[in-house]
Each structure stands twice: as structure tokens, then as C-alpha cells.
Image (cartoon, helix red, strand yellow):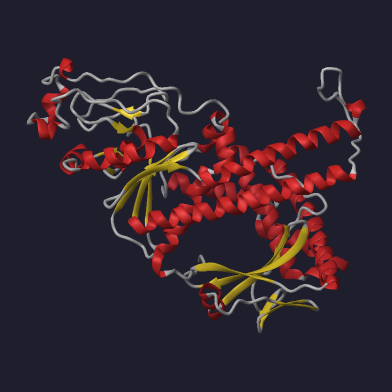
């Protein structure tokens, strides 16, 4: 019988650490790293044995069947039996890690912390086995930054605003005026996680209290009611709800730091070449083969500066994502957006995606919406094609260079992403409900046009929006012609002449 889970949230507090405490914590983190590497190697070895076993291959050949069907259950049972034979299970790895608790590392970590480290290694290999993530890597010295307990009754404990762990006592720094912290301290603590971070070249330690219950919600971020449509691109996001419509550059505040990062990257390359001239060919490329690199003190200092800039950028990006998620949830409790492949985004627009992180934003949106009781509906692009379809039902494939939606039925000109976000609000059962969209269209034309006009200069699209010919109707409803007549050519195309030129591409490869 599966154990019921309860809602949880994280309350993070900085810790007051003495130099002696810091030395001991660094030793314990390195002990955890060595155990993790040992468990990771054992898990990868057992995964190899599993894939080579006859039972596993027979289970792979079994028919999948529908979900919860007899065929699916038999297949799952066959995989479980194959996993059990080679010991590729979480508790099997706990049994393997038990030996470390009897050595000197067990005195510094504790049995429950060792079990959590083993679980972490097993889950990394399991995700790799399922094809959800890449092959996990072994942790080098200084790369293991967190440990956690299983309960708040043994191991790493939270007692009287202090973290207690096998002789260590680390008092927390608490801001009594912070309502979020005060709320977290009133809730029951499930377990404690210790996290190390490097801030401005100095090591800081934090306690993450995994508390039972729902997170604190500020009054200004109360969940709204209604449907919100989103259209997320590599560098832009369109948000359309019943109250507002907007299109803005995604995390535009991050762009100034890119110049500083690029400057430090060039400086690092010059310093590396100056210290290792024999490792480069005459054309400037790195020679093949194993080599030993030498780094100067200035190089190490520059590398620390670059790491600090990346850390600040990641922290700012996370903050910007959180603020935007709160803005969206205030507007509605049903969020609809296309299910996109962010891996494809990385291949086409790697620089922009690496800077803004649209995939991380969507994951943040899902998590916060679930905690707040909202719904995130992601629909496939194959059945909807919102960037190509019109309100009248006409489907026209548009290149990326065409940023405005204009149709002979009278819809437009409207910025393409804004119109897609508006249509997303009327997706029902993974398809566009044309009747519902047509009924809601009167009055929306002006609102979307205003949004398109306001944001167009900030998007830097080069060409102005297309102008309508004089006397042209704005929509099929206002022109007195039905949508079906418009689709079958009842409105001659010559009555609509567009005065616009082809626009330059919005994105370039690698942007």
C-alpha cells in the first residue's frame, strides 16, 4: 500500500557558521561526495547487468498495452522481477551503502544521511535508464553542495532555531519582520537540508526546512479567476487574459550582464593561452591528445569573477521567472499554452534560451500553479497550429519572418504571438473551439491591436505593422458576412490591400 504524501514547501534560512564549523562541514560534504560516487558506480554497473539480462530483454519484447490493462501490468511485473534479480532498486542500493556507515564516514554523516545520498545516486541513474536525462557524472572535489536527512527525529535536526547534526550546532539567522519566514517557522518540519553556496567568492551555508503544509501566499499574489493564454518564444512571451494583453521581451533585465560575461570569457581565453602556449597550433586551435594545463593566479581570479557573474545571473533569472509567474496566476486559474520542445529551442536559439531559460520558466509555472490550486493545460502544436490558423478557419503556413497576422476575412493586423496567445484561451480537448472563439471575438480586435502597437517598438522588429486599406471591414462580424462565406471567398481579395513590406527575421540562428 502506497504511503500518502502531504503538501510541502521550503523555508530557507542562513546559518551562522564559525571557521571550525565550516571546516567540519566541508569534510562532511566531501564524505558524502565519496559515498555518492561509490553508489553511482554501483548503480551504473547494475544497470549494465540489467540491460544484458535475458529477463529484461524478454520484458522489453512484451506488448505494452493500454494503461492499467492486464498486458501493461504483466509487463511492469516482468521489469520489477528483472530489477530484483540484479539488485537495481533503491533499497538494494541502501543495503550496498550500509557498509559506509560502519566506517569513519558513518561517524560524520549518520545512517539516514547516507541512505539519502544513496537514493540521490539511484534516482540519477534511474532517470538516465528511462531516457529522461543524460548519463550522470561522478562528482569532483568541491562539487557536492548539499546533504539532507530523512526525518526530523534523527540525523540532521531542527531544534530551537538551530541545526543540530552529530555534534555540530549551527544557529540560524532569522529576520523577525519577514512574514514568509515567520509562517515557515510555525509549520511542522519534515526534514532538514544543508546547502553550501559561494557568494562573492565566500562560502555560505543555509538550512532548508522542508515544512508540512501549503506555502505562504502574499495578498498581492492571490490566485485570480479565468483563462490565460500564453505564447512562449525563445526571447519573448505573450500573455492574454480577460483583463489584459501584453507581449514583452523575456527577462530583458538579464541582457546587460551578457556583455560583462563575454568580456571575462575573452580575458580567460587570453590568460589560458599565455600560460600554455605549447598546447595550441599555429592556427590557434587546441592540439589533440592529453595535456597538462597550467593556470596563473590571475586566471583563477578571473574564473572566480566569471562564476560569480553566472551565479548572479541565475539568481536574477529565477527571481524574474517568479515575478512573471505571479503576474500570470493573478490573472487567472487556468493557464493554457503550447507544449513545446525546449531541446529544439536550444539547438536553434541556444544563446537566447541559455540566457532566458523558457523551459525552466514553464517548470516554475507548473510547480507554482499546482501549489496554488491552478491548472496548467499544455496542448500539442500538431492539432492546433495557432500561429498558422485564423479565426475563420483558414490555415496558412507563415515563415518566422512574418510577425503579423492578417487574413482576408478581416482579422488583423495583429501581432502574431499576441493572436496565438488569444486563441490558446479557446483550446478545448487539444483542439481549437472555433465557435467559442468567434463568439468572443467582437470587441477583442481593438484590444489586441492596441497591445500589438504598444509592444512593437520594444521587440525591435524593424518594419511597421501593415496598414489596412480605407473602407475595409475589421472583422467578419462587423462586415455583415458570415465566417463560412469569408472562408469560401465571398469577400474578394482585391478589397483588402496590405501596405507592408516583408519583415526581417525575428530570430537568427544561435540567438
Residue situated furthest left in the rendering: 480
Q: Quadrant of residue 91?
A: bottom right
Q: Quadrant of residue 113?
A: bottom right
Q: Tell me what residue is drawn at x 71 percent, y 72 percent.
A: 15
Would residue 366 be seen by someone viewing this image from the given angle? no
State the image coordinates of residue 117 (x, y, percent, origin top left).
72, 60
Image quadrant for the C terminus?
A: top right
Would residue 209 be seen by someone viewing this image from the given angle? yes
Q: Tell me what residue is drawn at x 56 percent, y 47 percent.
A: 78
State the image coordinates of residue 398 (x, y, percent, origin top left).
36, 23
Against 508, residue 271 (above or below) is: below
Is 202 on the left-hand or right-hand side of 351?
right
State the image coordinates of residue 428 (x, y, percent, origin top left).
27, 44
Is 499 on the left-hand or right-hand side of 23?
left
Q: Tell me what residue is drawn at x 60 percent, y 76 percent.
A: 175
Q: Quadrant of residue 14?
A: bottom right
Looking at the picture, tell me which residue is in the foreground, 136 or 230.
Answer: 230
Residue situated furthest top in the rendering: 494
Looking at the picture, tell me which residue is in the foreground, 356 or 132.
Answer: 356
Looking at the picture, tell me which residue is in the foreground, 120 or 130.
Answer: 120
Is 146 on the left-hand or right-hand side of 292?
left
Amino acid at each position: 500500500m502506497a504511503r500518502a504524501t502531504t503538501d510541502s514547501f521550503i523555508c530557507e534560512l542562513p546559518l551562522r557558521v564559525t571557521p571550525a564549523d565550516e571546516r567540519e562541514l566541508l569534510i562532511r560534504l566531501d564524505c558524502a561526495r565519496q559515498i555518492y560516487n561509490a553508489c553511482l558506480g554501483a548503480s551504473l554497473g547494475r544497470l549494465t547487468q540489467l540491460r544484458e539480462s535475458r529477463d529484461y530483454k524478454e520484458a522489453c519484447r512484451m506488448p505494452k498495452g493500454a494503461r492499467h490493462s492486464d498486458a501493461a501490468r504483466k509487463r511492469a511485473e516482468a521489469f520489477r522481477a528483472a530489477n530484483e534479480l540484479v539488485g537495481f532498486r533503491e533499497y538494494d542500493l541502501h543495503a550496498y551503502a550500509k557498509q559506509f556507515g560502519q566506517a569513519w564516514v558513518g561517524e560524520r554523516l549518520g545512517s539516514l544521511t547516507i541512505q539519502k545520498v544513496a537514493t540521490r545516486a539511484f534516482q540519477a541513474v534511474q532517470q538516465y535508464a528511462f531516457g529522461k536525462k543524460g548519463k550522470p557524472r561522478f562528482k569532483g572535489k568541491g562539487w557536492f553542495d548539499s546533504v539532507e536527512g530523512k526525518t526530523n527525529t534523527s540525523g540532521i535536526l531542527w531544534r530551537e532555531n538551530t541545526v543540530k547534526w552529530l555534534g555540530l550546532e549551527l544557529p540560524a539567522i532569522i529576520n523577525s519582520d519577514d512574514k514568509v519566514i515567520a509562517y515557515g517557522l510555525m509549520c511542522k518540519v519534515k526534514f532538514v537540508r544543508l546547502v553550501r553556496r559561494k557568494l562573492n567568492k565566500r562560502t555560505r551555508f543555509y538550512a532548508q526546512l522542508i515544512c508540512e503544509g501549503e506555502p505562504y501566499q502574499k495578498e498581492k499574489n492571490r490566485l485570480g479567476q479565468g483563462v490565460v493564454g500564453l505564447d512562449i518564444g525563445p526571447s519573448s512571451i505573450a500573455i492574454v487574459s480577460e483583463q489584459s494583453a501584453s507581449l514583452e521581451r523575456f527577462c530583458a533585465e538579464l541582457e546587460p550582464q551578457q556583455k560583462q560575461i563575454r568580456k571575462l570569457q575573452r580575458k580567460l581565453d587570453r590568460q589560458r593561452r599565455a600560460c600554455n602556449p605549447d598546447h595550441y597550433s599555429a592556427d590557434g586551435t587546441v592540439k589533440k591528445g592529453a595535456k597538462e594545463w597550467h593556470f596563473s593566479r590571475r586566471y583563477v581570479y578571473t574564473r572566480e569573477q566569471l562564476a560569480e557573474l553566472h551565479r548572479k545571473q541565475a539568481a536574477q533569472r529565477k527571481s524574474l521567472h517568479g515575478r512573471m509567474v505571479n503576474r500570470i496566476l493573478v490573472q487567472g486559474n487556468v493557464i493554457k499554452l503550447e507544449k513545446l520542445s525546449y531541446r529544439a529551442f536550444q539547438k536553434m536559439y541556444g544563446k537566447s534560451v541559455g540566457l532566458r531559460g523558457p523551459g525552466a520558466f514553464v517548470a516554475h509555472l507548473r510547480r507554482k500553479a499546482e501549489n496554488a490550486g491552478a491548472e496548467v493545460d499544455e496542448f500539442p502544436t500538431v492539432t492546433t497550429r495557432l500561429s498558422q490558423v485564423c479565426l475563420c478557419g483558414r490555415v496558412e503556413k507563415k515563415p518566422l519572418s512574418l510577425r503579423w497576422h492578417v487574413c482576408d476575412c478581416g482579422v488583423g493586423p495583429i501581432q502574431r504571438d499576441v493572436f496565438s496567445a488569444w486563441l490558446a484561451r479557446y483550446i478545448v480537448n487539444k483542439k481549437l473551439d472555433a465557435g467559442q472563439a468567434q463568439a468572443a471575438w467582437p470587441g477583442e480586435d481593438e484590444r489586441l491591436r492596441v497591445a500589438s502597437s504598444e509592444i512593437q517598438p520594444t521587440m525591435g522588429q524593424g518594419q511597421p505593422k501593415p496598414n489596412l486599406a480605407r473602407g475595409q471591414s475589421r472583422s467578419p462580424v462587423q462586415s455583415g458576412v458570415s465566417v463560412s462565406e469569408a472562408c469560401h471567398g465571398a469577400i474578394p481579395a482585391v478589397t483588402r490591400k496590405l501596405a507592408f513590406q516583408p519583415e526581417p527575421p525575428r530570430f537568427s540562428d544561435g540567438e
